[in-house]
Image (cartoon, rainbow, N blue to C red):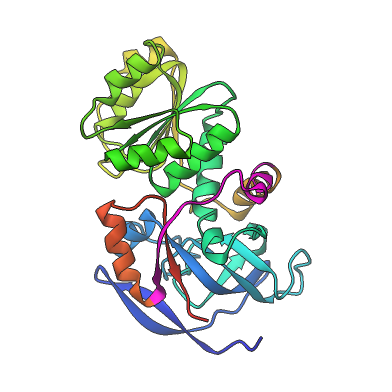
Amino acid sequence: MQIPDIMCAIEAHSGKLVPVERPVPVPKSDQVLVKVMAAGVNRPDIMQRKGLYPPPPSASDILGLEIAGIVVSLCNNINKLSVGDKVCALITGGGYAEYCLASSSLCLPIPENLSFIEATGIPETFFTVWSNVFDRGQLQKGETLLVHGGSSGIGTTAIQLAKAFGAKVIVTAGSFAKCQFCLKLGADTAINYKSQNFVSEIAKITDDKGVNVILDTIGGDYFQRNLQCLGLEGRLVQIAVQQSPKSEINLWTVMQNRLTITGSTLRTRDDTFKADIANKLLKHVWPLLLSGRIKPIIHSTFALSDAAQAHELMESSQHIGKIILTVAT
């Protein structure tokens, strides 16, 4: 496959997304060049567009944290991948483009039963959920997980993975339709946070015992309410702060119930850390994807040139699952 010198990419300027021409990047040690067939849209992209989430120093300034496509070039020291391989990859930036660099250790084979578009919905959410729910949150079979934003890309992934490994799942969502979708996907209980008090609902559902793990992307006044929802030895895992990064905390609740409060961001972690997650996904999750037992939930697709409209949809929170950009071939 002939690789051009120039490619189309999407840059963020003054809060707006602008199509530009950029040189096709050249892979360095342990990198591969991927012809992008599709790229995922995620909330960190929204924050970066607004200037609130700058990329790490070594990352591309082009938006995009996950891609699916075809390997078209690679360094000589890479032996586990070949030109022509179909892969999906977690990246630190550069996905909103026709070509993108990816670490070879973070390229995963696309399950043969999934399309490029479906495979693009895997890296960001599956890496994030595995790292935070199972590694940091230590969710075990028979325990109960509460997921805020159950109909989001993270939420739909967390529901499926937690159920696949024998946990009970409670979600919050912002409409009747979203709650119903989560239930059909496998959630045991769905709470409409706009019409119900999730703290009192969880107390009823659990007979005042609380949940074992909470995966939260909201922050703000959800923080103290989350502590009220945790049972003894409960774990709160904070992975985003859509509402606010600041909140008051009742330390008595933490001490009396022996709670663990943790959180993480994935983008700035090194490739060794992320590669460990990739290996766990290959071992534990890829068989579930290949069997069709779980799958990434895709809400809609937009052409790369329509990335601004994709961002508008994500900011409206009207979607269920993932929003994907497709790249013309």
From the viewer's side, name the closer residue of 120 and 318.
Answer: 318
Nearest the eye: 291 or 173: 291
Q: How many marks?
A: 0
Whether the magenta-drawn stretch holds residue 287 is answered as: yes
Residue 245 lies, with reference to residue 33, above or below; the image says: above
Q: Residue furthest right?
A: 79
Q: Is residue 265 left or right of residue 253?
A: right
Coordinates of residue 174 in the picture (x, y in percent):
27, 40
236 w.r.t. 39: above or below: above
Q: Position of residue 140 (x, y in %)?
A: 58, 25
Image quadrant in which the N terminus is located: bottom right
- The residue at 39%/47% (across/down) is 152
In reply to whether residue 41 is colored magenta, the answer given is no
**Relative to 322, 286 lies left or right:** right
- Picture quadrant of residue 76: bottom right
Q: Is residue 185 above or below residue 100?
A: above
Left or right for 31, reference 64: right
Report if residue 150 is visible in the image. Answer: no
**On the image, which quarter does residue 225 sit in?**
top left
Residue 3 at x, y percent in the picture: 61, 87
Residue 236 appears at what percent x and percent y? 42, 28
Residue 264 appears in the picture as rendered: yes
Image: 327 above or below 122: below
Q: Is residue 41 left or right of residue 69?
A: left
The magenta span reads: 284-304
What residue is drawn where x is 25% and y is 41%?
Answer: 244
Residue at 25 percent across and 42 percent down: it is: 243
